Amino acid sequence: MKVLLSIFSILVALATTTLAEPIPIFSDEPITLNCNDDPRGVDVGDINGDEIMDIVVVNTAIDAYTILLGNNAGSYEYGGMFDPFDEEPRDVALADLQGLGRMDMVIPCTGDIDWGYTQIFHNTGWGYSIHQSLYGGRGPWHCVVDEFDGSPGLDVVLTYPRCGANLSVERNSRNPSQ
């Protein structure tokens, strides 16, 4: 009986407590950045090694991606527009896939002609070069990078909406400690 009274007392106290007003998280005016036509995917990471977050934007209609470099003033400078070497890039994920302390890029491209590939761009420290093309099904769309299989190295998960309800997990076979 005492337990029931204690639970009832707690419930009454919770029901009569006035909750504080929520504090707005985003109260400043947004910063609008020019990132070229048809932005579809975006990710942030330090791509040039200056310890300041940069932004990579995928521009699907113009088959390109745009780099916006962060600066110490809290804004971004245009860092260039580049070709992902396939049609219709859809998304981007930045991650250190090789364990070298540099952000590599994963860009799924749905493709008009060849049904699309996912391009892995290796960060060489002075720019990007294609490291590998993955084909796991028709029209890759979105990607996520994380450690999924318990082995060393970050893996890539891709969605393939043109193939029904398919996902693929591209397992990283490179041991970052090598």
Image (spheres, rainbow, N blue to C red):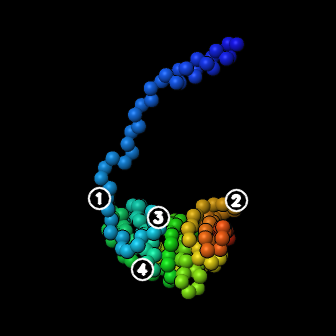
- The three-letter amino acid code for the residue at tag 1 is Ala
Q: Residue beneath label 3, please? A: 43
Asked whether 87 or 161 is in front, the reply is 161
Measure the alpha-carbon separation of dots 1 and 4: 30 Å
Q: Quadrant of residue 19?
A: top left
The residue shown at (52%, 24%) is 15
Q: Looking at the image, do the residues carrying marks 1 and 2 touch, with CB atoms under 8 Å apart?
A: no
- The three-letter amino acid code for the residue at tag 3 is Asp
Residue 62, labelled with which disc? 4
Asked whether 103 or 31 is in front, the reply is 31
Q: Nearer the viewer, mark 3 or mark 2?
A: 3
Label 3 vs 2, first from the N-terminus: 3
Q: Nearer the viewer, mark 3 or mark 4?
A: 4
Measure the alpha-carbon separation of dots 3 and 4: 18 Å
- The three-letter amino acid code for the residue at tag 2 is Gly
**Looking at the image, which residue sits at the far top?**
2
Q: Residue beneath label 2, please? A: 150
Q: Residue beneath label 1, please? A: 73
Asked whether 107 or 174 is in front, the reply is 107
